Image (tube, rainbow, N blue to C red):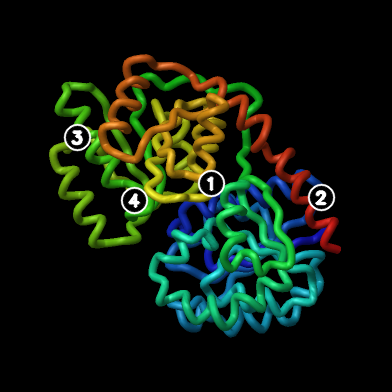
C-alpha cells in the first residue's frame, strides 16, 4: 500500500508536527506500507531523518496561505497513483490540493478542529471554514488523536466529515527503559505561544528559585508569538544561569535533549489534543509533569503515566519540586507508551483504517 502525506513544511518551525509525521511514516512502514511525503520548501531544510522516505519538495508561490503552483500541478498529476492521500493541515492551500485527488482522502486534525483552536485568529479561518472546508470534510475521513478531541470536534465542523477515527500519535519506544539522568535539566519542548503555557512554566521556575531549589532548565522550540515571547524572556531574567532558551531544533537534537533530561514538563494552557512531547517523555522513561487542560492528560494521569497539574505556576512548581526531591525513572509511563503508542501498534491501526477506505 502506497500512501502520500501532504504537509505545508518539514522544517524545524513545524515543531511537534515534524516529529509526529516522522514517527507516523515509520509506523506505517513497519506495517507494510510505503509512505511518501509532499511538502513545501521552508527557510530551514527538512530534518535529515526524513531522508528515510521518498520526499518531494515544492516552491511556495504565496507563503501566508501556503500556495504553490508546483505542488498543485504535481498532485493533480500523481496523487491518483496512491492508495490514500493523508493531509496534515486544515488552514493552508496544500489541503485544498490534496482534496482534488481521486484517491481516498484522510485528514489528520492535529487539534485544529477543536472549538478553542477555531476561536484563535478566527478571522483568518472564517473564509475557509465557511466556503471550502465543508466540501473537503464531506469526502474525507478525519483522524483524531484521542477520544476527547473527537467528541469536542464533532459538535462543530468535524461533524461534517464523511467519517472519523481515533488513532493516537506514536513514538519509537526502546526495548528497555532508558537510564535516569538525575543531574539533567527540566525540559520543555514546544512553541513559545500562549497556548503552550510557557509563561506559567517560567513563573513556576521562579518560584522554585525563590525557595532555594537547585535546578537547571532548558526550553527548546520556535517563537510563534513575538509579543508573548518578549514577556516570557523578561520574566525569565532572574533565572539567568539556570534557564536556557535554545530555539527551534532539528528532531535529532530535540531527542538528545530528552535523553539527558531529568524530567519533561508540558504546561498545556488550552485543550490541546495530544502533546507529542508527553509521549516522547514517557517513552524515554522520564517523569512527565503535564497540565490537566491537555485533553489526553486526565487519562494518562489516571493510569499513573504522567503527573497532572492544574494550570498555574504554584501547581507546576509543586509537581517539579517533588520530582527533583525524589528522582525516579517513570516506569509506568514507559510501559504505557510501549503498550499504546509504539510504532507497531499505531501502524496496525493505520493499516486497518486505510484498508477500510479502499
Query: Disc 2 versus disc 3: distance between alpha carbons?
Result: 48 Å
Horizontal side of residue 209 vs 139, given as left or right: left
Task: Give the residue number, with chain letter if any, for mark 1.
Answer: 274
Cα distance in 3D space between marks 1 and 4? 22 Å
Q: CA distance from mark 1 to mark 2?
A: 21 Å
Point out the frontmost of discs 3 and 4: 3
Sequence-earlier tag: 2 or 3: 3
Q: Residues within 10 Å of mark 1 (few under 14, many from 20)?
A: many
x and y percent of residue 109 in the render?
Answer: 59, 60
Q: Which mark is residue 247?
A: 4
Q: Is residue 290 left or right of residue 30?
A: left
Which residue in the structure is indicated by mark 3?
206
Residue identified by numbered label 2: 352
> Which is nearer the eye, 220 or 212?
212
Earlier in the chain: of badge 4 and badge 2, it is: 4
Q: Quadrant of residue 268?
A: top left
Can residue 4 be seen in the rendering of this structure? no
Mark 1 vs mark 4: give the one in front.
Answer: 1
Question: Of the residues under marks 3 and 4, which one precedes in the sequence?
Answer: 3
Q: Secondary structure at mark 2?
A: helix
Amino acid at each position: 500500500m502506497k500512501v502520500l502525506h501532504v504537509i505545508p513544511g518539514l522544517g524545524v518551525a513545524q515543531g511537534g508536527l515534524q516529529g509526529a509525521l516522522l514517527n507516523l511514516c515509520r509506523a506505517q512502514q513497519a506495517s507494510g506500507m510505503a509512505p511518501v511525503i509532499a511538502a513545501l520548501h521552508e527557510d530551514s531544510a527538512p530534518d535529515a531523518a526524513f531522508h528515510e522516505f521518498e520526499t518531494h519538495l515544492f516552491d511556495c508561490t504565496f507563503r501566508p496561505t501556503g500556495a504553490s503552483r508546483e505542488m498543485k500541478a504535481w498532485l493533480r498529476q500523481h496523487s491518483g497513483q496512491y492508495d490514500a492521500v493523508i493531509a496534515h493541515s486544515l488552514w493552508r492551500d496544500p489541503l485544498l490540493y490534496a482534496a482534488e485527488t481521486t484517491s481516498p482522502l484522510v485528514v489528520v486534525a492535529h487539534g485544529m478542529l477543536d472549538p478553542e483552536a477555531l476561536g484563535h485568529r478566527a478571522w483568518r479561518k472564517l473564509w475557509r471554514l465557511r466556503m471550502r472546508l465543508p466540501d473537503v470534510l464531506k469526502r474525507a475521513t478525519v483522524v483524531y488523536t484521542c477520544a476527547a478531541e473527537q467528541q469536542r470536534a464533532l459538535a462543530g465542523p468535524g461533524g461534517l466529515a464523511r467519517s472519523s477515527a481515533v488513532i493516537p500519535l506514536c513514538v519509537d519506544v526502546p526495548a528497555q527503559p532508558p537510564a535516569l539522568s538525575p543531574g539533567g535539566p527540566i525540559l520543555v519542548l514546544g512553541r513559545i505561544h500562549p497556548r503552550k503555557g510557557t509563561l506559567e512554566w517560567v513563573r513556576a521556575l521562579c518560584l522554585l528559585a525563590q525557595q532555594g531549589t537547585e535546578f537547571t532548565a532548558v526550553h527548546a522550540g520556535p517563537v510563534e508569538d513575538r509579543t508573548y515571547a518578549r514577556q516570557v524572556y523578561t520574566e525569565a531574567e532572574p533565572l539567568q544561569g539556570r534557564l536556557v532558551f535554545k530555539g527551534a531544533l532539528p528532531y535529532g537534537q530535540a531527542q538528545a535533549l530528552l535523553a539527558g533530561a531529568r524530567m519533561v514538563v508540558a504546561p498545556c494552557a488550552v485543550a490541546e489534543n495530544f502533546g507529542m512531547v508527553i509521549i516522547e517523555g514517557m517513552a524515554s522513561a522520564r517523569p512527565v509533569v503535564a497540565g490537566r487542560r491537555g485533553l489526553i492528560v486526565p487519562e494518562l494521569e489516571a493510569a499513573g503515566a504522567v503527573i497532572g497539574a492544574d494550570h498555574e505556576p504554584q501547581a507546576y512548581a509543586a509537581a517539579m519540586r517533588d520530582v527533583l526531591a525524589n528522582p525516579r525513572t517513570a516506569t509506568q509511563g514507559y510501559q504505557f507508551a510501549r503498550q499504546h503508542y509504539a510504532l507497531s501498534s499505531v501502524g496496525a491501526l493505520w493499516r486497518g483504517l486505510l484498508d477500510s477506505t479502499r
